[in-house]
Image: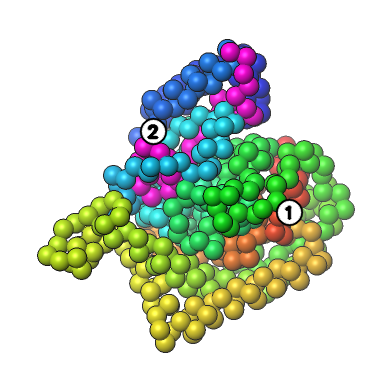
Amino acid sequence: MTLAETARAVRAGERSAREIVDEHLALIADRDGALHAFNHVMTDDARAAADEVDRRVAAGDDPGSLAGVGVALKDNMCTRGVPTTCSSRILEHWHPPYDATILSRLAAAGAVMVGKTNLDEFAMGSSTENSAFGPTCNPHDPTRVPGGSSGGSAAAVAAGFVPAAFGSDTGGSIRQPAALCGVVGVKPTYGRVSRYGLVAFASSLDQIGPFAASVEDAALLFEVVAGHDPLDSTSVPEPAPSVVDGLGDGVEGLRVGLTKEFVEGADADVVARVEEAARALEKAGAIVSEASVPAAVYGLSAYYLIAPAEASSNLARYDGVRYGLRVDGDDITDMYTATRAAGFGAEVKRRIMLGTYALSAGYYDAYYGQAQRVRTLIIRDFEAAYADHDLLLGATSPTTAFEIGAKTENPLTMYLSDVFTIPSNLAGHPAISVPYGTGDDGLPVGVQVLAPALAEPLMFRAAAALERSLS
Ligand code: GLN
């Protein structure tokens, strides 16, 4: 059943939202002990929200386009009165006093919030192994990672716990886990979806987006949450366009660029799936040719200066005074040190140190300044590529899901998981990962469709065509 079909049945009173949410809760109770997709299951709140949807239907009201649809939220999105931990000890017992806009919009459309999903601490990572509460396992093979940092959300959809989930993508954290778990994952244009209530990691890169089992479902979720929010000063002021309407329009005549930099270095089986996707689009009428975004190869280096720099500043607020954990000390400096030493995990500390160094007097221009100039070059190279192409195509991740523990010793090997996704964040552009067959190991492969800023309608249209080519 698609999300639209579920909502239709609930709105028509043919299915009760309560029965649907109870099915989700039963599945989670049965299998999440083994997978650990959720940090917190909102059992009572979810049942109450579902009962309210049913009550409104009975009273002749229309609860909205997501009536009765169960949704999971990454645990870095604020939920009033419900733990929001960012999978960090420092926020372990924090209950936000307000809701993120994403949650208000979903609830206003009749969706039922089922729980908060596991992530790499503060969204820093590509495997969900950096969670202070233990890793999430990949539902396709529990010895493998689900990707990250939104691994819990990807796994929750892949396991069938919920049909919809949301994550945040700063360098690939929606698309890469979507690829590794065999689900659809969308990073919208920067500013397209409100970040009000998303705990900040790197504010010039962070963006919220949906996970779903199909492109149509992801498109519907995007439509519900996209659009201007006065509470987010970086929110795009114009109204978001419909993306569902054009899903069946096909790719006839569209110029698609198979982008060298977004396949180079990927495993051979991943490259093979991307080439098959390109041929499928061609068969559907697209004009496929080679494309290049030369400066994209410097994306990873620029990202690991810009993102830690912003993170070192954003995470300064966790000082034992204003939020979460406090470990007492002899004086205030001791208290800060003890709190941050106990509250942050190793990767978060590494990022804070990298970022503080990159921003320090004397090094600022050589590191942070230089990285910002590289960012401009990447934006220019994308612009040049989009002069000749409507969309770009590449791999989402260079590999399929790797073994738990395989990349935890050397951070650089983990960072390389995001080489193909980071450039879109630096440019602020949208991109979607669509499952496209499997690798030699039988695990899912994701193909990435990239689009210019605000071109989500075109991006979803091509993604839908890609998905249809598999059936
Ligand atoms: N894996 C990247 C990082 O560790 C991206 C994370 C993200 O998108 N939140 O920073």
Image position, residue 87 (x, y; %): 36, 49
Question: Position of 406 compared to 400: left or right?
Answer: left
Quadrant in which the N terminus appears: top right
Q: Position of residue 213 (x, y in %)?
A: 60, 37
> In which image quadrant can residue 248 be found?
top right
Q: Earlier in the sequence, mark 1 or mark 2?
A: 2
Identity of the residue furthest to the left in this view: 330
Residue 380, by quadrant, is bottom right
| Marker disc for residue 41 | 2
On screen, residue 250 versus residue 18, left or right, reads: right
The magenta segment: 59-86
Q: Is residue 179 above or below residue 382?
A: above
Asked if residue 445 is positioned above or below residue 378 in the image, the reply reads: above
**Looking at the picture, which amino acid does disc 2 mark?**
Val
- The residue located at (16%, 58%) in the rendering is 328
Q: Which residue is mark 1?
A: 455
Q: How is the image coloured?
A: rainbow
Label 1 – label 2 distance at C-alpha: 35 Å
SS class, disc 1: loop
In the picture, measured across the screen, residue 329 lies left or right of residue 217, that is left
Rendering quarter of residue 336: bottom left
